[in-house]
Amino acid sequence: MNWRGTWQARWQAASTREQGLLLLALALVGLALLWWLALAPALAVLKRADLQHQQLGTQLQQMQQMQAQAQALQALPTLDAREARSALEAALKPLGSAAQISTQMDRLTVTLKGVEASALVQVLSVARQNAHLAASEARLKRAASGAWDGSLVFTLPAQ
């Protein structure tokens, strides 16, 4: 006899009350499985949906702001290599002898000695805004006095 035949024989041997209780137990197990496998995960996702929607909205706003900044930077007039070098030299003037500039083809290397952090931030900001240059390499070390030593490399635009 196979397993199906065995179960059918046991089912027939059971009383009507036992059959009803067994069907009730199977229905409860089926409902529990339906809850744990289908409904509970869906409800958990639904509960988190508002928070995720708010987070994604915030991320979207930040990305749109960054897009607007990028478009504004792209709209700025481009400088040729000579103008960019002049603007970078002007940005470095407040540092005086603490900043030395040297040129190698299309690369400007700025060597810094004992530059305060606030002055360094100001120079980098002015270089970005006026010369349209950002440091492509930075090798900086903080001295014991709290000032910065090292070098910054800027790549000039194509001529």
Image (spheres, grey):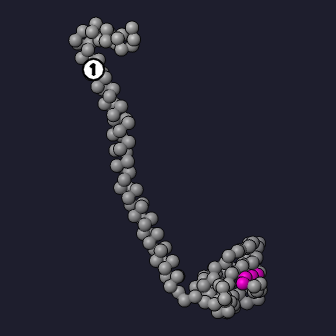
Q: Is residue 152 left or right of residue 6?
A: right
Residue at far left of view: 16
Residue at far front of view: 1
Residue 140 position within the rendered picture, expressed as x and y whole percent measured from the top left: 73, 73
The residue nearer to you, when weighing 147 against 46, is 46
Residue 12 position within the rendered picture, expressed as x and y whole percent measured from the top left: 27, 9
Report the residue at 42% width, 60% height from top.
55
Residue 3: in magenta span: no
Residue 61 position within the rendered picture, expressed as x and y whole percent measured from the top left: 42, 69
Q: Is residue 139 left or right of residue 80?
A: right
Say what secondary structure mark 1 lies in. Answer: helix
Q: Check the image and report above or below for 145 versus 49.
A: below
Q: Which residues are magenta?
A: 106-111
Q: Is residue 14 left or right of residue 85?
A: left
The residue nearer to you, when weighing 92 against 61, is 61
Residue 88 position within the rendered picture, expressed as x and y whole percent measured from the top left: 67, 88
Q: Quadrant of residue 98?
A: bottom right
Task: List the residue tagged with mark 1.
Answer: 23
Q: Amino acid at mark 1?
A: Leu
